Amino acid sequence: MSTREYMLGNVAIARGIVEGGGQVISGYPGTPSSEIIGTLASMKERDFYVEWSVNEKVALEVAAGAAMAGVRSVVTMKHVGLNVAADPLMTLAYTGVKGSMVIIVADDPSCHSSQNEQDTRRYSQFSLIPCLDPCTPQEAKDMLPYAFGISNKLQMPVIFRPTTRISHGKSDVELGPVTPEMPVADFQKDLERWVMIPKNARVRHVHLLGIQQDILEELENSPWNELEIKEGAKVGVITSGIASVYAREAVIRQDVNASFLKIGTYPVPVNKIRTIMENCERLIIFEEMEPVVEEQVRLIAQELGSAVEIIGKMQGPVPRIFELNTDICADVLAEVLGLERPVVPSEVTEDFDYNACRLELPMRPPVMCPGCSHRATFHVMKKVYGKNAIFPSDIGCYTLGIQSGTVDTTLCMGGSITVASGIYQAGEKRPICCSIGDSTFFHTGMNGLLNAIYNKADITVTIVDNRTTAMTGHQPNPGMGKMATGEETVEVCLEDLCRGLGAEFVETVDPYDLERTEEVFKRAKSYKGTSVVITEQLCVIDAKRSGIRRRPFIIDPEACTGCRICVNLGCPAIEFDTKSKKASINAMCTGCSVCARLCKFDAISEVNI
């Protein structure tokens, strides 16, 4: 009897890794991929190794080493993380693997939690590494054992590309058996394969090109590519990944007689594309993000001399930006086929008033948590350096400091220090104070600090250390003294690390102590060269989880003058009544005391409990 569980897509992916017999799993946290390793690390009984690596390049190299030794490995990251790991990725395509290796890269259409939209299928094309594109959490789970299998058969890594709605969607998932036997590590020396000096790389490039037909044939008839030819259908729908779910529902909703090809592998199934092309007069292609499938369909049509009409993203009307959904697909079908607007689903009466049921929600821009220490850091930073100073920043919770006027740039992980250096080296005379989180500093900020010190950049580097990787779900990092599994390990001291990189001005402060923090920032500003200020305070969420309780604060309405200094801090726990012109503190207060330290009228005090 089969077992079914209702689970998150990333949990289903983690289950697929277990069913496939994954042995070494590494990664760097990044939404929407983070829960995969989090799920595996939380398993009390496991016979595999799992780690959070310091960045994606390191994580991919750890997994590559394991696969070179002959075992089954997995690396996880989000789409922008593959940019960091691109260097080893491209050469790994040449060397291949001995065991099995799956590279899980979660794409984020519509930039729900990312600085760009990026299509990992392009990396598949670029590197000539095969790619799997699941359409449901169930398929995502089922693909993983298959991915291990073809990786071993082809002696190549395999890219696995879930998107946000797969990773963070939920559904019933039928579980499969767990692979009982696992290969034993046995690294075999093979200099011509593993050592990519030019002489060997040239030979391996020829090999990589030579196995592309084998990859195509292996994937062509895999269960992840499904072709359905409808009798009498003049229209064909070609789709991929989760867009296939939207497109199929739209076809049903619009009552379109259409042949249907779902693509789940890259390289694309050429023979199936030719078949649907030969049976239709018009092809409509639905895929999220880039027109990867569409480009291949157009090439195949050109090779065949086909007159079939191809409709997709390149010339419209399928949008090239943001996520697709069933309504968008239905609208495209209506426009292309000259149909009425999408038909109301059968279970809803025709006179159903959709507009009457719509709830207009107010805009709620993301803000830092009540009591977040970053807010205090930014307040002092702006006070000391001035609002006209330049404040490059980075990727993390602290990016929300944009609302406090202390985030002028955000390029990529670890980019704040290097961008700050570049602005200084360009000849900028205004003060420059950049900010970067503890986890991001370990990720790629260390190299930037070393470069700034070595090249004498006159900037201040602020490391906002909240003792966790908060933005992606509170994963541990090397500064916390624990591993992904909770096991204790060395706790890297940020002060010692910065001094080891050559920094001579390094100071650590508690950002809640505004006077001390201001004094240190003033000295950092006047220091000639690269100064480092570490503002260390436990994340308020982790503090609450660990049992730390501070007394909340209250505002005396009689003493409040309505000056709004506390309100301008931007803490969600502080409100202002425009009628009474008085500030007040709500139940969200975490007791950080920053507002009380700011108040010039002693109107804010601890609640007596």
Image (cartoon, helix red, strand yellow):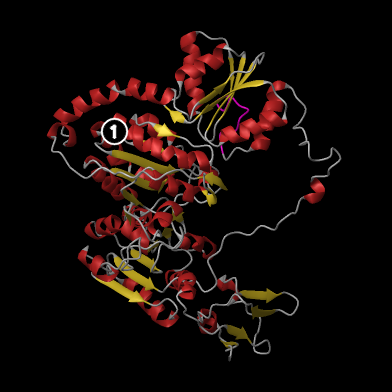
Asked whether 349 or 384 is in front, the reply is: 349
**What's under tag 1, amino acid-wise?**
Ala
| Front position in the image: 514 or 121 | 121
Q: Residue at x 58, y 91 (%)?
A: 608
Instruction: Give the farthest residue toward the right.
Output: 351
Give the x, y percent position of residue 579.
Answer: 76, 76
Q: Is residue 32 visible?
A: no
Picture coordinates of residue 227 (x, y %)? 54, 22
| Residue for point 25% across, 31% down | 94
Q: Secondary structure at mark 1?
A: helix
User: How far across and how far down the image is residue 43, in percent?
Assistant: 40, 58
Residue 187 among those drawn in magenta = no
Residue, x 54% and y 80% (percent of image)?
595
Magenta stretch? 312-321
Q: Residue 381 vs residue 2: left or right?
A: left
Residue 549 in sight from this viewpoint: yes
Q: Quadrant of the C terminus?
A: bottom right
Q: Quadrant of residue 93?
A: top left
* Residue picked out by circle 1: 93
